[in-house]
Amino acid sequence: MIDRIKKLFRAEPEHRDVAGEFDKYSPTWVYLKDILNQEIADLRIKNDKPLDSGQTAVLRGQIKMCKRLLEIEKEPGGIIGTRFNAPADR
């Protein structure tokens, strides 16, 4: 999943630090939401199986991260026009 998301956000080096505007109707965001919702569904299926507490905690953490990413469109400042700075590769 992470590799698919990374492909969506590849930018030329000169554009990485440019502030942008968030548009929840962009094809990229719609596609990313589909990926994240499918990932949540897949993780929940895995979490329904017998697992030890460590494995369960990892799955719950992954589900929480996917949900947090989905909340981006609900950030303060409005849905369209939310400012962000794209992080450079590390």
Image (tube, rainbow, N blue to C red):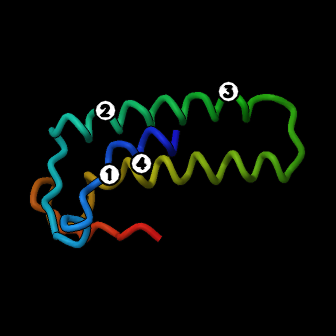
Are the residues flagged by discs 3 and 1 in contact, CB closer than 8 Å?
Answer: no
How many residues crowd mark 4 within 10 Å: few (<14), some (14–19), many (20+)?
Answer: few
- Type of residue at label 4? Lys
How many residues crowd mark 2 within 10 Å: few (<14), some (14–19), many (20+)?
Answer: few
Residue 45, numbered label: 3
Residue beneath label 2, please?
31
- Type of residue at label 3? Ile
Callout 4 secondary element: helix
Using the numbered discs, state the Cα–Cα distance from disc 3 to disc 2 in whole angstroms.
22 Å
Query: Nearer the N terminus, badge 1 or badge 2?
Result: 1
**Residue 88 placement (x, y as % from top left):** 36, 70
How many residues crowd mark 3 within 10 Å: few (<14), some (14–19), many (20+)?
Answer: few
Q: Tell whether 44 sits left or right of 52.
A: left
Are the residues flagged by discs 1 and 4 in contact, CB closer than 8 Å?
Answer: yes
**Residue 66 placement (x, y as % from top left):** 49, 47
Are the residues flagged by discs 1 and 2 in contact, CB closer than 8 Å?
Answer: no
Query: Nearer the N terminus, badge 4 or badge 2?
Result: 4
How many residues crowd mark 1 within 10 Å: few (<14), some (14–19), many (20+)?
Answer: few
Query: Nearer the N terminus, badge 4 or badge 3?
Result: 4
- Type of residue at label 2? Tyr
89 in relation to 23, above or below:
below
Q: Residue at x 52, y 38 (%)?
A: 1
Residue beneath label 4, please?
6
